[in-house]
Image: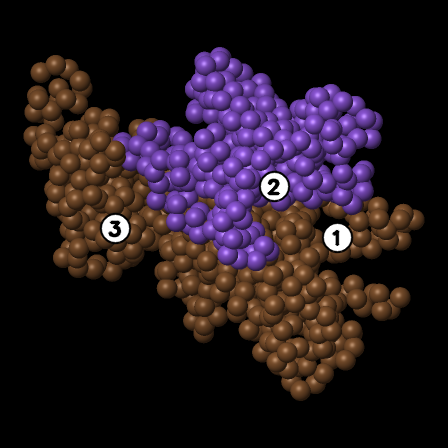
Amino acid sequence: MSYYITSLLGLLPIFIILGISFNLLLGYGGLLSVSHGGFFGVGAYVTAILIKDHQLEFLPAVLVGALLAGVMSMSVGYAAGRLSDEFLFIVTIAVQVALVELFNNLEVTGRSAGIAGIPRPTVFGQQLDSNTKVMILAWVMCALVTLVCWRVVNSPYGRLLKSLREDVPAARSLGKRALWTKVTVFAFSSAIAGMAGGLYAMHTLYISPAEFTLDRTVEILSITIIGGMAAYWGPFLGALVVLALPEMLSFADIPDSVAGPINGIIYTLAVLLLLIYRPQGLLGRDPVKVAERNAARRAAKSGQPAHAGSSDAVPEVSLDLFARVVGDQETAEVKTLRSEGIGIAFGGLKAVDDVTLSVRPGQITALVGPNGAGKTTVFNLLSGALKADQGKTFYGDRDISGLSIERRAQLGVVRSFQEVRLFEGMTVQENIHVAVTDIKHESLISQFTVGAWRGRDEADGERAEQILRSLGLHEKRHMLARDLSYAEQKMLMMGRLLATGAACYLLDEPMSGLDQAARAQLSELLRQIVADGSTSICIVEHSMQVVREVASWVMFLDRGRLLTEGSPEDVMNDPELTAIYFGHPV
Amino acid sequence: MDLLITLIKTGLVMGLLYGLFAYGLSLILSVNKVFHVAQGATFVFSAYVFYTLGTTLEWPVVLAFLGAVAAAALAACLMQYLIYVPLAKRDADPIVVMVASLLVVAFASYVIEFAWGAGVASAAVPDWFGWDTRIAGIRVDVYDISVLVLSVALFVVMHWFLTRTHAGLEFRAVGDNPERAQALAINLDRVYLRSMILGSVLVVPAAVLLALKAPIHPSMGFDLLLKAVIALTIGGMGRMSGALIGGLLVGLTETIPLYWLPTEWGEFIVYIVAFVFVLFRPTGLVGNKRKPRKSAKSSDTTSTSDPMSTSGSVESAEPTPVS
């Protein structure tokens, strides 16, 4: 009996590690990978082979195993960065099956028979000669993984991961590295799974390909879902359920041949029911509550009363505060965004043809023209969302034609979308916090450097709060972005752009859908932004009234060509242009 | 040389079978916008029903086949009402829908293991199924011919259905733009249910043929499903022709390298080729690269749920190329 309990207790931490690492992908990253069981296997095989055939100690062996699993999974991470969900699903299934086929066919992995008679592990010269000692080793590693992953999840990296789960193009438009982040999270998560694999090999002392198949992946998936996606302590409960269920059935009086399928039926059914009726899992909690609790905790730590923030919050948007937000950025050298003869064609259609324009600092430039004139496409070309077929784009003296959207954003050219595209499942505060954080502090490694412990992120958080205060959103900072009203969402979107500290803003219809009052506020904000003389704004706008109100320079686009530019009065009083715009015959 | 020709023939027949399996998947993907992995469950379930009716109860093959069709339709209704409708109601993430669908496959394989036992089962084969002949020195049997005839026939019928009949046009309209289709008084729920049933029934011929050809087992759903999914990816998502062409390519990729390599590496090669293929050409062979026509709304909401217009890469998931 004690042997039996030890065996179960030894398996539990391994499953918890698997669940935690998978939660990083599915729960926090929103990445459905079906190859986790395979990378678990890579770790198990490498560790077993190194210990059995090369007499390595456990720690170096498992490190090599984890490293190999991590490196191999980078290809999957690369796929995740480039492909949509369905394709990622297929790619990971292909990798999963290919890995099992490898285990099945390679000489070194013992083909379908697997590897038997793995010696017990040695740690620092000491052989762990009983199940209990191996169990303790597993729990120690589980505790380590729990700590490290806790740090990762609650760091700028974790926040970035969540923002990528919500909306990749929006995150990229803020200068975030989507592809690299996904590659690293896959490598990190799979390396941890590989570590679990090494522990598993030490626990069972016998491994075969059948243990690392798609069924295992589904089991890991179940652990995560039962506990709750993005619920940090979820895998603890999930692993317990998945492990204990077959054991409980073995006490019931049913034959073994039926117990297996019954166990499978019960847990797949339970997971399905959870998915449909309680998608947040058993331990999943309302993100709003979590945010409020964390804030209260932080406030308590710094010695302030928990809700001090809400009393001094500004109910109305205060324009002085705008100025403060804007003025905070150090004035960099003045740069002009300009394009020379850019053009792009979709099939036979020339959407933008030979457009040369500049967005000058200290001015609000409006890009106007009828629907289908190519205004948004010009924006996509300027911001790097589309690559031009011809022509060049410069920012200052630098040729940025070949740069991606996130590189341009890092240089200071950011854009908004026609839709608001907030990170809807994150709180208002997090939306801004992501944008404030410098990408240098968002890499996985930098979460474990000295600076990361010295309140760097808290300072960013404080700055985010300050921006929220000036936008009049401070009181709602713990709400989910999707629960804000439309005008508030637009404000938040502007705040998120401002938080990046960029110097050139491309705003696609920022005023659409706003009422008079909100529009006046936003216009004032835009004027404040360019008042420093070094910041430039270009807006796409349909309402001539708005253009007259805010713009000091107007560019008129029709059928992909820049017809004319000039002051608002000149352009709008041109009868020919009015005819094109309003569709009247000349 | 004979070996190579035999391998090619085997590859073609297997490929057609994968294509046959992928038709339904492709239909459901393009109409319901659901990556219906649970098709694997329907497949095994109908194969076992066919086995029970035809072998255990000794019904004639035709009746057993009809019984399997009914079973597939029933499975489709159950999945639609118990899984997809509740998930759609709470506006679940496409990833969650896919996870649920995957779990259904696992669930079904356990249920079948429970009801029919974990071992293999061999269906009784009618005498005429054993007939074979030699064409140009290769053995061709009834199975090969049936796979060929059925996959081509179903392809033609489906093409006719989708382009010439009112119901088929409704399918395509809903697949293209559900909101607009609804505005034209098309009942979305009805179309979704119909396409789910039709797509599920399309898998029955493959299930029955495979049950007659080889012993069946509870986890066979996964194996064939994966090949069909890969066929669909290589051929191009959401198109009948893509399913057929992709199926053939998968079949050939699986068999032809065996001329030079040991048999057990066939599967590995298929999956590695699929992996590389998806990485470098996610739109498939039949897919088109850039679609200029896309409303702002759809680019907002479907960056993950619409496989036909996102064409896989992040770049093309960007909003409206033409404003």
Residue under numbered circle 3: A413
Residue under numbered circle 2: B224
Whole-angstrom CA distance, mark 2 to mark 3, is 49 Å
Residue A104 versus residue A522 in the image, above or below: below
Tell which chain the image draws in purple: B
Residue A526 versus residue A142 in the image, above or below: above
Whole-angstrom CA distance, mark 3 to mark 1, is 50 Å
Q: In screen coordinates, is A122 left or right of B175? A: right
Query: Circle 1 marks a residue in which chain?
Result: A
Q: In screen coordinates, is A512 left or right of B217? A: left
Q: Residue at x 60, y 70 (%)?
A: A108
Q: In screen coordinates, is A109 left or right of A456? A: right
Whole-angstrom CA distance, mark 2 to mark 1, is 31 Å
The colour scheme of the drawn protein is by chain
Q: Can you tell which quarter of the image residue A17 is in?
A: bottom right
Residue A168: % across, % down: 41, 47
Chain A appears in which tint? Answer: brown
Q: Residue at x 40, y 54 (%)?
A: A179
- Pointer 2 and pointer 1 on the same chain: no
Of A424 and A205, nearer the camera is A205
Q: How many marks?
A: 3
Q: Can you tell which quarter of the image residue A411 is in?
A: bottom left
Decide which of tag 3 and tag 1 comes sooner along the chain: 1
Secondary element type, mark 3: strand
The answer to whether residue A219 is seen in the rendering is: yes
Q: Residue at x 41, y 58 (%)?
A: A180
Query: Circle 3 marks a residue in which chain?
Result: A
Going by the picture, which residue comes out furthest to the bottom? A125
Marking on residue A241: 1
